[in-house]
Structure formats: structure tokens, C-alpha cells
Image (tube, rainbow, N blue to C red):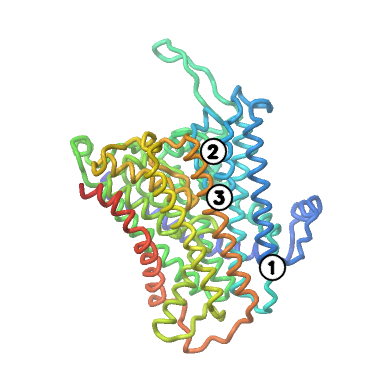
Amino acid sequence: MNTSVAAALQVGVVVFILAAAYVPLGDYMARVFSGARDWAPERLLYKLVRVDPKREQTWTGYAMAVIAFSFMGVLFLYLLQRLQGVLPWSDGRAAVSPAMAFNTAISFVANTNWQSFSPEMVMSNLTQMLGLAVQNFLSAAVGLAVAIALIRGIIARKGDGHLGNFWVDLTRATLRILLPLSIVIAVLLLTQGAIQSFKSGFDFIGLDGSSGRSIVGPFASQEAIKELGTNGGGTLSANAAHPFSNPTPLSNVVEVIALLIIPVCLTRTYGTLVGDRRQGLTILGVMAVIWSGMLAVVWAFESHTNGVAAEAAGAMMEGKEQRFGVAGSVLFAVSTTGTSTGAVNSAHDSYSAGGGGALIWNMLLGEIAPGGVGTGLYGMLVLAIIAVFVGGLLVGRTPQFLGKKIGQQEITMAALSILVMPALVLIGTAITVILSTTTGFQGNSGDPGTPESIHGFSEVLYAYASAANNNGSAFGGLTVTSDWFQTSLGFAMLLGRFLPIIFVLALAGLLATQKTRQTTTATLPTHGLLYGGLLTGTVLLVAGLTFFPAMALGPIAEALS
């Protein structure tokens, strides 16, 4: 089959499935978070943990619950790794080192799933299932809860500042949305040959008489929630490129759909909850324009040949699985960097300078096309509020967003939430490349000004962009096992996750204390092509002004060299 036709078919299938699920899943999620009735297992859980599901929380109470719950998650996961060697089902694996355990605990609780280790060699099945997989569910549920809290702040009419109950939102997101969908995805992966086993491996004898051992584990279930929850951490170091986790081109398409389905359908949830579905469609349109544009750019770079090996293969096939080809690899790469997933089915470090640079740029846009579970929606809504503020000032109209005034306090919280990530990326990259002790960890370091040193800079930029955006993917040439990388990237993931959440919830609280105003003709409309264009321009302008100098020092210089 012609490669262009294969690419079109894969994209077409993904878009068709997402379109088919958009209305039913989006409206279902709206009912989940707006319904007053609790399921029996939920009521039992609330009783056991002594939570009053009817008690509303202000933004401070909601934020404290998020931080306290996440802190306990970090502590539990850290201890689980440190005690791994003495726990049952350790499979002979020793305790994880303190620095690595610290980095990994923050990584999975922050929905980053950055892995500075080979998981099949370091983590036991118990740690994988009880620690890492559980956080794949819970960290995604936290993102969903925060997005819903922001929507409640936007639509609040009483002015009492209430945003709902975090514990109820967390429970419903996990039990009613993530768990059922992950079961469906896991079953689909099993039909394609993905492995699901409670054993740690089996011994075999090869055709030449040599003995070996194959690693197995609960791969299908882990793969399902890592994609569906936009987590990204794999049970294998090859991640979604390994045939045990992602066996066929069809399973690859299923995983891409799992990456995108909740963030895409959340725009419908947003439109349904605010009572104007045009709002959700406008947000979806902006996400679709950015996603499709990035897909076209990376596809163009990776389809052209550069070098003898690429010309012989007919495309840039280095680091890509033959069973996926350029089409399946690019579709996965753009989707995973456009969400906060970080799962990979190809080696991003092996992409062309332009293609790899575009993947970095996709993260630096803020991962809002369509973004992670919950994080993509609330990130886009913050940018939508900024666009309203800027547009209103430009044309002399009152800055209002769905009947809520956007004043000094509101725009301050919005601005702070989007400034966290650029500060972490640029400061972390600058310090790392200055330190003389870090160049030895770059797989492509060299004399200043050489192509090798330029790509080494791109590796570092990618690492901090991935950590601060809670993505988790990496350019594989960078070795990040030193204490500096473990600690600095750990704090980048921690601050990159929870500072924006605090600012977003503060913004939601400010909006919730306002009573809805009557929209007038002097108010800038927040739907339609005109506003969609303004929002798209705001997204591109914010990232362009912030990151163009860094991109010029790395991927752009490398592409032009």
C-alpha cells in the first residue's frame, strides 16, 4: 500500500472514532460530574474514609485536598520503591536508590511518568501494579477534577465561591470514567496479542542452543491506562515500541485513540456544562488546527530523506518500527507530545532535526492540543481567558468570559499559571548547559558550535520541556541518572504540575465568587471563527515569544547546519 494512503487511512480511522465518541462520551462525563446520586461502592468508600460527599469546598479547600492527596501518593510510592527488595513478589529486584525513587515517585504522581531506568530490570510486578499503575489512574483523575472545578467556577451563579468536592470528583473520575474505559482498551490490546501475565518472565532455549530469559508482565492493562490517562510510563524500556505492549498497526491506532479520546471529548463536556456547546466546539477547533498542523509538519520532515541510509530506506526510518512505519510513528509522536502522555513508539532522538524540533515545539505550546486528561482543557481555558482579556482591550470591549468579569486578580492568576512552565524549562536548561559536569551525560556533546553540541542542547531542552510539561518522553541520547538530573527534573515535574493547579484553582475561586453578569453587545464573543483565530494566535504568540531564542539555539540551528 502507498505510504500516503496508509497515513491517510490511519488518521481517518482515528478522527472517525473520536467523532463517533465525541457526543456520547462528552455528555456522559458531564452527567458524571453534575449528577447528585452516588453509586453504592462510592458511598461505602466515602464512609470508610470519612468524607462527606455533600460538603462543598472553596478553592483553598479544594487545592489543599489536591496537594495533601498527592503528597501522600508521593510518600507511599517512594516507600514502596525503597522497600521493594523485602516485599513479596519482588522477583529478586533490589530496592530502588533514593534519588531514583524520589524522581520516580514525583514523576508518576505528577502524571509525568518520566523514567530514568529500565522498568523491566528495576521495578518488580508488585511495584508496577500497586504503585505505578495505581498512580496512572489517580493522577489522571486529579487532572480531570481540576478541569471540572474550573468549569464550575466559570458557571457558578450564587457567588459563594464553591467549586464542588475534590474527593467526589476524584472518585467518580476513577470509577466511572477511567476504569471502564481502560478495561475496554486493555481487552482490545489483548485481541491484538499484547501480553498480560502475572509472571515476571520465562526461560527459553534458542534455535542455536543458547539459553535466555524473556520478560513478561501485566503489559496490556498497564498500556491501556498509561495511554488513556495520558501518563506514558511503560513496563518496558522500549515503551509502546515493544511488540509485547503494542504488537500490530491496529493496536497502534487503538493506543493513539486512547491518548486523544478523553481530552477531545472533554471539550463537549465543557460545552454541555456551560450550556453553550458552541464554546466547546470552538475550543475543539483550535485544538484540531494545532494538532493537524503539527502532524503535517512532522510528517513532511520525516518523509524526506537526508543521508545515504534514509535514501536507501525511502524515508527517515532510523529509530522507527517497521510495523508502524513513518505514518504510525509520526501520528503517535505528535499525539503523545500534544498531550501530557510521553509514551513513545519510536525513538524521538532519531527524528530529523526539523521533526524532532517540531515535537519539542509541540510540548512548548503548553500541551493543549488536545492536552492531557483535564490538564489540556484547563490549560486551554486559561489561554482562552487571556485571549478574551487581550482582545477586549484591543477593541475597547469589556473583558468578560461567559458572564464573568476578567479583572486584575483574574488575569494575574491566569498569567501566573502559564508562566510556570517557561520559567522551569528555560532556567533548568540554562543551568544544565552551563554546568561543566553535565556535558558528559549528553550523547551528542561536542565542541561549541558543532552540530553535535547543538543536538546536545536540544536533548537538554527536550528533557526540561518534557518534565515541566509533565510529558515524560525524552531524547534518548541524554543520560539522566546523575543526582543533578534526578533532582532538578524531579522538582521541574513537581512544580510544573502543582503550581499551575494552584493558580488555576485560585482563578476558579475568583470566578466562583462573582455572580453571572448579563452578556451585552459590548462583550467579546467567545465562540466562532473570529474568536477561534484569536485564541490560536494567542497560543502561538505566547510560545513563540517565549521559546524562539531557545529553539534557535537548538533545533532550528541544527536543521540549518
The crowding category of the residue bearing disc 3, from other C-alpha atoms within 10 Å (few below 14, some 14 to 19, many at least 20), is many
Q: Name the residue under label 3.
A: 494
| Left or right, 411 with reference to 157 | left
Identity of the residue drawn at 59% across and 73% down: 154
Identity of the residue drawn at 39% across and 69% down: 538
Q: Name the residue under label 2.
A: 220
Asked whether disc 3 touches disc 1, contact meaning CB atoms under 8 Å apart, the reply is: no
Residue 5 visible from this viewpoint: no
In the rendered image, the vertical position of residue 399 relative to residue 26, given as above or below: below
The single residue placed furthest to the top in the displayed view is 209
| Left or right, 123 with reference to 56 | left
**Secondary structure of the residue carrying numbered label 1:** loop
Residue type, label 1: Thr
Q: Name the residue under label 1.
A: 58
361 or 554, which lies in front? 554
| Left or right, 454 with reference to 46 | left
Determine the CA span between mark 3 and mark 1: 23 Å
Residue type, label 2: Ala
Residue 217 visible from this viewpoint: yes
Instruction: List x then y, in percent, for residue 434.
Output: 37, 44
